[in-house]
Each structure stands twice: as structure tokens, then as C-alpha cells.
Amino acid sequence: MEKIKKWHKHYPSEISTTIKYDEKPLHAFLEESAKVYGEKKALYFLGKELSFTELYQESRKMANYMQKLELQKGDKVAIMLPNCPQAVISYYAALMAGAIVVQTNPLYTERELEYQLKDSDATLIVCLDILLPRVTNIRANTAIKHTIVTGIKDYLPFPKNLIYPFIQKKQYSIVVKVEQSEDTHVWKSMIDQTSEDYQSVDIDPVKDLALLQYTGGTTGNPKGVMLTHYNLVANVQMCDAWLYKTKKGEEIILGVIPFFHVYGMTTVMINSVMIGSKMVLLPKFDAGDVLKTIQKQKPTLFPGAPTIYIGLLNHPDIKKYDLSSIKACISGSAPLPAEVQEQFEKITGGRLVEGYGLTESSPVTHANLVWENRVSGSIGIPWPDTDSAIYRMESDEEADIGEVGEIAVKGPQIMQGYWNNQEETDNVLKDGWLYTGDLGYMDEDGYFYVVDRKKDMIIAGGYNIYPREVEEVLYEHEGIQEAVVAGIPDPYRGETVKAYVVLKEGYTVDEEELNGFCRKHLAAYKVPRLYEFRSELPKTAVGKILRRKLVDEEKENSKESSTTI
């Protein structure tokens, strides 16, 4: 008998608190969609379209080729691609061949790439032609036996495919000539010359891994999160249930958020394949390109991150575009400022709600209801079959209502553990509960709130200060586009609060004005003592601001200043 939770009373009748999940491998859904939707367009990429039938056929061909390269069940395939057709094809091909996907950020340096390939034991990598030199330079230090190389031009329509190499040369100042060899393979010739007759592999969806997804690595080395087929299927079917007004076979999902991030992979790529939606892919975020794409392609669903929505809202021509096709957006990866939510909804007429999750939970665990009651500043309520609790710090006791503690989650989407890292696994997985490292609380109505990362909490003069609270106030200032707050070393207070700020175009704001503004809304000990104005803030590929990088910069600067005195 399912235990009734405080938040279940908010569920509308259309959403069940528990779901029967399909125990099938992820690639089985591509096969089903090819049968059901056939010639319906599965994806759009810079003018090129592929039907579900074509996507399935090309995935089968690539699976066959991978098997010819002696890829075995359980081997790791690294995919180092932006959002493009090849990212989707190679993902499903690897799973068909029985492999485990290792999503790899195309922006990785050689050092970061070498670490991930060595840690995962990947034996095959799929990469862009302009990334080949990076792969080649570190390959000898890894277990990589084969490299499959593709280019953006491979899936561009005529005449874009002829023009693109010149654009690429101008943009990246690099021309890479790729030649077929025993261990380097050219994508286009493989697809053209390989049959679809791959050998089907028996997969246990509950036990077999589909993915090693490396965490952002904002603190220490990234860890490989082990996610099974079932983990990912469950989370996407939860997402489908949450967005109950969407219709199978009819939605168009905008894929701006990268597939090498688990949020983009689940909410755009896997979700589109499972419900027969057309995915509209963009290889990188450019506000102008996104606005043009929304107007032309008319997406109905737009998963994103606050920095993406902020970037669009601050585009000078946003009002010239028709964005009314958008029905729903779930924002993840960082706190969603209320101001951004309100402005974006006003311009699009759609719904934008904040959600919450981690790589370790495939990723979503909580979200606000899209069409019903939502609470500004809250991450919402747990998804179906997901339990959540707040635990007191360094204790196994549940916190009281409203008391800040560590957020823990439990459900079918929770990872199996960290790859080759039992110690870290034991630190965060306890009796099926995932301890997130995030500080938060639950209100008496069952809504959850994130206060901050456990490691990001600032202790100044004995006071606990949560950066998110200060950031929310800064975002209320009309001149601020982006803001992040961090604790930096202070000989007297231990730490002091510093705000890093990006101003909106056309605004002039100084430290004195911000200080006065913050003092109206915050207790004195929470007000930033220092402000730094920047043209941009360091971010991950998915748009999460790297607070830790700013803190490291401060520490490095303080070291240098102390040695020069």
C-alpha cells in the first residue's frame, strides 16, 4: 500500500502518485516510434530533417559498424558531440550494440578529456572533426581503440553542407583532414556503406547500465554516475506524466540544452523518442538563433536553464519574434529568479516552472506543477514514486517543518552508485536514500525549497549565510542581468560575502547603490561587503554559474598578493 505524503494533496486528478514503468531498454522505444510514427519528422537540425524511420535505420547501421569494430556488451562508448543528429544516432547505436554511453563535453580540455576516458575505460569515441586533434593527443594514455569522426556538415542540407567548412575555418581557425584508417573511421562513408543488420543484444533494463554520466566536477574530479536503462526510462515517464496536457506524436521540443548534460538528454532526446515528438536541435546557445528558431519551428516544449531564459529576455529584438507556440518550460540546473519567470511567461504566454534534480537522479526529482498551483522560490514537490525528506546536518534525524537541513531523495530514478568509487557512493547513498549535498527545507504544505549547496554555505562571523537568498535580492534590482554570491576568506570574519554582477546593457550601477538596495532587503550580516562587476560569469556548458571557480580565483589572488608583499 502506497504511503500518502504531504505533497500528494496537490496532485491534480490527471497525475497519479505512482506509475507502472516500462521495463524495456531505451533503444526499444526508438524501434517502437519508428513503427508507430514512421515518416513523421523525428528531428530538425539547421534545415535538415530526419524521420523516425531514418533515425532508426541510421542508428542500426551505426550499431552494426560498432559491432564490426568488436564492441562488446558492457564496453564504453564516449560521445563527444554538440546537439546534432549524430549525437542522437550514436547514442542509440551504442545502446543497441549493448554498450554503455559516456557523455563527454566537447569543451573539455585535453586534461579533462584524458581523465574521463581513463576513468571510464572507454574503448571507442565518437567526436567532431575539429575535436580530433584533442582526442589524438591524449589517446595513447587511454583505452581508446577506435575513433569515429564526423562533422557538422554531414547532416546539413545542400548548399549549407558545402559552405559550412569555410565558416568553420573562419570560426575556429582550424581545418582537419580526416582519413579512414584501421583505428580512425569516417562517419559519412560508414553510414553509406554499412547495412542495418546489427546483432541484437540481451539487455536487463533494471540491472544493465545505459550511461556513465560524469558530474560537473565543480569540486574535485568528476565522478561517473551509473544509470541503468530503467533509471532513465522511469524519469522520462515521470516527466511525461507531469506534462499531462502534452500529446504523443504532436509535440515539438526545442533542444538547446546540451545532450551531454543529463537534463537535456532526458527531457529532450529520450523524451522526444519515447513520445514521438519532433526535436529541434541547436548545437550551441545563441539568443538570436534561438528566437529565430522558435518563430520558424514553433516548439511547444522548451526545457532550459535560467541563464538561457535570461539571455533571451535581454535580447534587444525579443519583441519582434512570435514565441506564442511555447506551452511549457521546466527550468533546471540553477535557481530560477521570480522576475525571469514572470517576464518569460508574459512574453510567450506559456508556463515556466522551476524544477530540481541531480545527475545522480537521472536527473529530476521535484518540480512545480505546470498548470496548477505553484510556489515562487520553491523547487516544487516530488514527482510520482519519488520520496523526499530533510535531514539534520550530520544526523539521521528528520528535520522539523521549516528547518534547514540536507535534502535527501529516493525513487526509481536514483543512480546505482559512482563508477569505481565505493567510498563516495557510500557517502551519498544510504538505505536507498540519495543525500544530495543541497541544503533546504520543506514547508507545512509539502513544498520544498533549496537554500544552497552544503559546500557553498558562507559562515561569516559565526552566522550562516545562504548565497541563494542574497542572489534572489540582487536579481530584484532592475539593472542586474546575472549575479552570483560567494564566501571569500576574511581574516576577521572567517569569510565575507562577495557579489559578482553582470549588468544589463544600458544600465550604470555602482557598489554604493547595490549596497543600499541590499540593506533594504537583507539583515546587515548578509549584505555583500564586496562587489565585482564583470562582463560575464564563468559557466558550465549547461549554463550553471561556476561559483567554485570564482572562489578558487579569489584564493589564488590572495596567495599572489601575500607572496608579493
Image: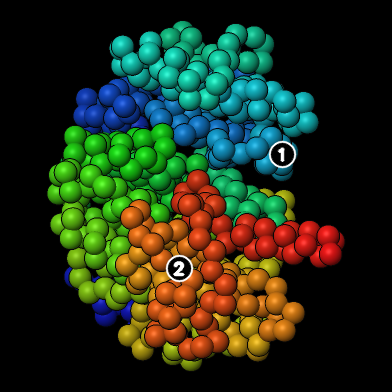
Reading the image, the residue beneath label 2 is: 510
- On the picture, is 135 further left or further right than 150? right
Q: Position of residue 57 (x, y in %)?
A: 37, 21
User: For residue 103, what is the image quadrant?
Assistant: top right
Residue under numbered circle 1: 111
| Residue 557, quarter of picture | bottom right
The residue positioned farthest toward the bottom in the image shown: 400
Q: Is residue 276 in view?
A: no
Dot 2 alpha-carbon crowd within 10 angstroms: few under 14, some 14 to 19, many 20 or more: few
Q: Quadrant of residue 270?
A: top left
**Nearest to the observer: residue 385 or residue 305:** 305
Q: Left or right? Give the position of 269 relative to 224.
A: left
Task: Please tell me which residue is depicted at 40% across the width and 79% down the height of the picture.
Answer: 517
Residue under the image location 57 percent in, 72 percent down: 530
Residue 143 on image: x %, y %: 73, 30
Tell me the element at label 2: loop
Relative to 99, is 248 on the left or the right?
A: left
The image position of residue 427, as x and y in percent, is: 68, 68
Identity of the residue drawn at 30% across and 39% down? 288
Q: CA distance from mark 1 to mark 2?
A: 39 Å
Please tell me which residue lies in front, 550 or 502: 502
Closer to the camera: disc 1 or disc 2?
2
Q: Are marks 1 and 2 in contact (CB under 8 Å)?
A: no
Which residue shows up at 51% across the image and 88% down it?
A: 524
Q: Label 2 amino acid? A: Asp
Residue 174 x/y as whole percent: 56, 19
Instruction: Inspect the image, locate mark 1, and give the three-letter code of the amino acid beneath it.
Output: Arg
Between 383 and 297, which is closer to the camera in this rendering? Answer: 297
